[in-house]
Image: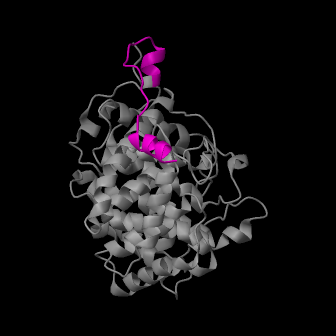
Amino acid sequence: MYSGQLRSEDSGRSNWLDRLTRVVDPVLDGAARRVLHKEMPIGAVPGFEEARRESTRLEAVARSLLGLAPWLESSALPWDERTVQEQTGAKAREALGALFEPDSPDFCDVRSTRQALVEAAFLGQALALAPAALWEDLDERTRVAVLRSLAATRVHQPHANNWLLFSAMVEVALCRLGEEWEVAPIQRALDQFEAWYVGDGAYADGEWFRWDFYNSLVIHPMLLDILAFCEDVIPEWAGFRDQVMARSQRMAVILERMVAPDGSFPPIGRSLAYRCGALHLLAYLAVHDELPGDLPAGVAREVLFSSIVRTLDAPGTFDHEGWLRPGLAGDQPGLAENYISTGSLYLCTVAFYPLGLDPSDSFWTAEGMPSTWAALWSGQDARADAALRDESLRDRSEAG
């Protein structure tokens, strides 16, 4: 019978953490020393270097902190992780000062680049997920600088697609941090994505549906976090989260069935250079104990780790200084769109969310199980797949 293992090491926590720290260490070390501008390559498509020069450092830090947030916030780590957690958290807080204090050589003026809206959202999401680790121990000067920068991104109008969620998440973060915030961008994002829901767990990303991984990379996780963080402020939004969760769980089932036994998945759509970050939703539901009932923890762990290994262990993934290179499985610069730079690539870290779970959680203790792909194609029996029937679509059709 197929074992579900096509790699030489197990999917235990230490092997996850080793990879996560390898990815983020150059970013946090450089930011803590305030030399990112000097040492970090821009890594943009030829002709777009200048356009990405200002944003790439902010991208690298914000995205790294988002992937680290659940683990940094955990209070139940094994002893051998605690020192690494403390050191990483200290560097993360130093990185915030480096980016947002105006006298820093790594200061990023968020007004000068529209991309800052995206990164403010990822950073705000990280701060909301890890307030104890990333916010409470910040000095007052850095707090003020961060809050001013988050609010300053309001000068950038979002595109009519997943960017609406970025504007909404900035307001959510300001709300969670006790600052003045605006309801309208949040309501607009929720209303628009409800209108863009196309069925069976999937949303269009703007007017048109696209075959890519943005439902997992951004849309479902941000919708869920926006609703979770705001349900105690605006109670009428709370009931909507159940519907969004059902859709997210269906999308997670689809994602799991797309991953091959070696951790690869269909190379379709844009932003493939985010590598294992394409499975963000699977990692999100795991860390929040919301995996659907027909997706066991032992399967989710194996699928996630297989994709982490497949996309990050490929030769050429890192340059000689340890920085990520564009690619899905190795050094593949042709996969980089014109909005991709070195900093963009650090969205891969969101696949590591489950490190925020207690080591005694079933995600870590359950016996590893083969993926649906592996089980079915080795001849094992399984329950037939079924689409999600969402009555909201029928109501919309009848209303139209």
Coloured how?
one colour
The segment highlighted magenta reads 373-400
Task: Name which residue lies at 47% across and 70% down.
Answer: 185
Coordinates of residue 242 in the picture (x, y in percent): 31, 48
Instruction: Please name whichever residue, 154 or 32, is drawn nearer the observer in this view of the structure.
Output: 154
Q: Nearer the viewer, residue 71 or 172?
A: 172
When the figure is inspected, residue 310 is found, relative to residue 341, above or below; the finding is above
Res 83 seen here: no
Name the residue located 56 percent from the left edge and 48 percent from the top edge: 204
Q: Does residue 258 lie above or below 163 as drawn?
A: above
Q: Kindly identify the residue that appears in the image at 47 percent across and 62 percent down.
A: 189
Q: Residue at x 59, y 34 (%)?
A: 266
Image spot of residue 309 (x, y percent): 49, 38
Picture layout, residue 262 above or below residue 23? above
The reply to whether residue 187 is in sight is yes
Residue 23 coordinates in the image, percent (x, y)? 49, 54
**222 horizontally vs 55: left or right:** left
Q: Is residue 384 magenta?
A: yes
- Place residue 339 in its image quadrant: bottom right
Which residue of the protein is positioned furthest toward the front in this rendering?
399
Q: Quadrant of residue 239?
A: bottom left
